Amino acid sequence: MNTVRQLDRVVIRFAGDSGDGMQLTGDRFTAETAKLGNDLSTLPNYPAEIRAPAGTLPGVSSFQIHFADTDILTPGDHPEVLIAMNPAALKANLRDLKSGGTIVVNTDEFTKRNLTKVGYEANPLEDGSLDDFQVHQVALASLTIGALAEFEVSKKDAERSKNMFALGLVSWMYSRPIEATEEFLRGKFKAKPLIAEANIAALKAGWNYGDTTEAFAVRFEIPPAKLSAGTYRNITGNTALAWGITAAGVASGLPVFLGAYPITPASDILHELSKHKRFGVTTVQAEDEIAAVGAALGASWGGALGVTTSSGPGIALKSETISLAVSLELPLLVVDVQRAGPSTGLPTKTEQADLVMAMFGRHGEAPIAILAPQSPSDCFGIMLEAARIALAYRTPVMVLSDGYIANGAEPWKLPELADLPDISVPFATETNGVDAKGEPVFLPYLRDPETLARPWAVPGTPGLQHRIGGIEKADKTGDISYDPANHDFMVRTRAAKIAGVDVPDLEVDDPVGDADVLVLGWGSTWGPIGAAVRGLRDKGVPIARAHLRYLNPMPKNTAEVLARYDRVVVPEMNLGQLALLLRGNFPGTNVVGYNQVRGLPFTSNELQDALEEVIKNG
Amino acid sequence: MADVKLDAPKLKAKDFKSTQEVRWCPGCGDYAILAAVQSFLPELGLEREKIAFVSGIGCSSRFPYYLNTYGIHSIHGRAPAIATGLAVSRPDLSVWVVTGDGDALSIGGNHLIHALRRNVNLKILLFNNRIYGLTKGQYSPTSGAGTLTKSSPMGSVDSPFNPLSLALGSEATFVARTLDSDRAHLQEVLRAAAEHEGSAFVEIYQNCPIFNDGAFEVLKNPETRDESIIRLQDGEPIRFGGADGDKVVVQSGYGLQVRDAAEVDEADVVVHKADVDDPAYAFALSRLSGVALDHTPIGVFRNVKRPTYDKGVRSQVDEAAAGVDRTEALDRLLHSGDTWTVL
């Protein structure tokens, strides 16, 4: 009889060869956990190569999940449980595991050859090097093959189901229901019912193995979190972003046109949107990044909501066209799912080093609005906001997501669609001026006095034929103008338009009001910063925090907020790009950078230590 | 332009003139092309607002400013990409691209070949003057090897593109060539291009009087033109060389060859057919002339039917979106898959 013990939280990492199906295993465990009502956060970590040589360290793929009975902010710094499908997975992940943690290891792969491949001179399962951990040695592959003996599947196919055996076992260990996964497998292998049933049998065999063998004395339960009432789903950043774009089409009443070229880690947005044609979403997989943004801009000119999605290298290629969009003053959404650079860098790893490119990475004075989601589910709302600004101000808007947000997942309380904002804008249909002879004319650069937006007259509108282009335009008429004073006026007007974009105030979380130090982040550092701040407050250390979702323009109260604190700590996964902007825009601020570029999100522990250091040594 | 209604309002050439002052160099071939296009556009039978001209960068790309239609003067080489976005999302418009040899074949080569491959419903007018004019006279991807320019003082060492061969290699469904100075022929080709459903690629030989004057003189000079120009007429044997047509085109090896008519059996003279499915025929035609322009076919080389990209994309969207209440569908999307409710 097993003992059942209650836990408030746990961090589990599934690790194996990139062909072992660890991402799928993690996804299913996540779905089971979400269904149970735990709060959760996940972090996949996989190699750039689709199939690196089997059994090698570069080929290790992993998926980490943190779940709890309270609300949580990060996928967890250090796993307490590691499922290692081979020696490479053990070796690559052991250093992250908490001392005393649990290891479930697939002994079938611990052959001399596989050990040598990753540089183990002795078998770590036998040499005592794992004595600090609780190790469960399970012959996952042979047990799976044995469990599927009566199925008419090849040995290879049977062996491939070992990830489902592992999922069943871990699901049993942490009291997760597996029925939804059975349904999922039936759907996934609809065309191959035998494979579906074999996988389900492996899943159940894993569960039963935990239940019947005496190897596992303790079983754990993590009660549901007390989340606010509502309907929830689990969602990744890329999916939320694609759904946000879809929702922006609904909220604006415009057809969405996505021009995109495949690039990691943004391609899933293209994949997702190409499934949503029923919303009037058109997706064009263009010949290159430049064509992708060009087609989106052409569609915007024609009255669609033009969108392009990419990552840093692709955004660099789009730069000239984004500048054209600044000059044409047409709506355009540009999504940069940042990854570690420069150049190809670490394409599957995260970074926040495109902020300065987003601000200034164009020729001429070419200001655009810039927004950044702070978590996977925030991507939905941020795209609605980006579309609101792009449409109301006829401007390109750049959204800076990153690899951590894109692939990470968290529960999302579904919004009431009755609350979907109306972000529609009218097209111009009438002339708006008179020429020298008093005849009515259309002035394509006559601006709305409040927003400074120009009229959006789409081709096909009778009587409003006009020409626009990259050459500087005369104020109001839009005719070609080389006049120095006009150029000066137009440059300043375009800058004033972006500076005047209406964005909500920066909210400060300073519960006691006695903090001297403010920690100010942007983008995906929101979770780790939040966890670190919680940790400090639990210890009685006062700290204030704020997070910028709007990076250009920044909220109007930013200067006033910064002035309230002695020091402003800015943690970034770059070498200090927001810090640079703050020092330039708010010169009196004492900005302290905390920077890492390891391709991985901050751990909340190290962030907490760093913040405490600043507070103490102030 | 199958989706465009052709119930003709009676417009005139002057209705297509914009208020902008035309600023090409005196004597530029672009003037003749502009006049020809302005007087041709009423034939489309479309209201002016239903026509959109998209250009890139270069002398030719100033074209949209001078037409009273919708127009966009974009960035170097990207006009086919921008026009693709417009054409896909707006089936009610007649979309034209105006480009040059540098714009289309050098910096924008990738967009051109992919627009042609996809067969987007665009009419692409490539003004080929074999030189960079706006940047003041560097050799272009259609300049012959050995061209002396500021950037090639000892002669360019590049081999040029044959624009029609390139277009045909890109799976273009409509390929034609004409001359800036021959208004009747130019308009005849424009007419055929406008009637074609899909990408229509038209190379227009255009004289640059400043940096490459006389580049096409051999096709214009009364003393040489009859010997040099092969006027392609659909369904007609290919004859040229003066009033009696003393030269003919025959098959030769894997391609085509110019021969004296007197030496050839009448039955062996190639009869031109633009709708031949195999692009090898049009390709062979495109190879009859090189940089030297000795035997230069003009007219419609190829005109075949193939489904268009923009229609294909739209029909998928239309099929999926038919009868869908988007707000309700969005609600269903958000609630799809595994969800749970906290009370």
Image: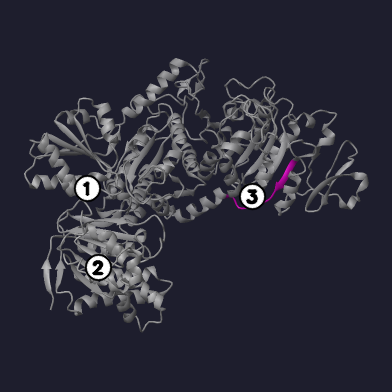
**B101 left or right, relative to A94:** right
Task: Say which quadrant the C terminus of chain A sits in.
Answer: top left
Give the color scheme: rainbow, by chain, secondary structure or one colour. Answer: one colour
Q: Which residue is mark 3?
A: B171
Q: Which residue is mark 1?
A: A527
Q: Is residue A188 magenta?
A: no
Residue A517 in which image quadrant: top left
Image marks 1 and 3: residues in contact by CB distance under 8 Å? no
Q: Residues within 10 Å of mark 2 (few under 14, many from 20)?
A: some
Chain under disc 3: B
Chain under disc 1: A
Of badges 2 and 1, the one in the foreground is 2
Closer to the camera in the image, A131 or B283: A131
The answer to whether any part of residue A182 appears in the image is no
* x 29%, y 55%: residue: A235
Q: CA–CA distance between discs 3 and 2?
A: 60 Å
Q: Residues within 10 Å of mark 3 (few under 14, many from 20)?
A: some
Q: Amino acid at mark 1?
A: Gly
* x 82%, y 32%: residue: B225
Q: Which residues are magenta?
A: B299-308
Q: Are marks 3 and 2 on the same chain?
A: no
Of badges 3 and 2, the one in the foreground is 2
Q: Position of residue B75 (x, y in %)?
A: 52, 33
Q: Which residue is mark 2?
A: A124
Q: Amino acid at mark 2?
A: Pro
Element under disc 2: loop
Q: Is residue B301 magenta?
A: yes
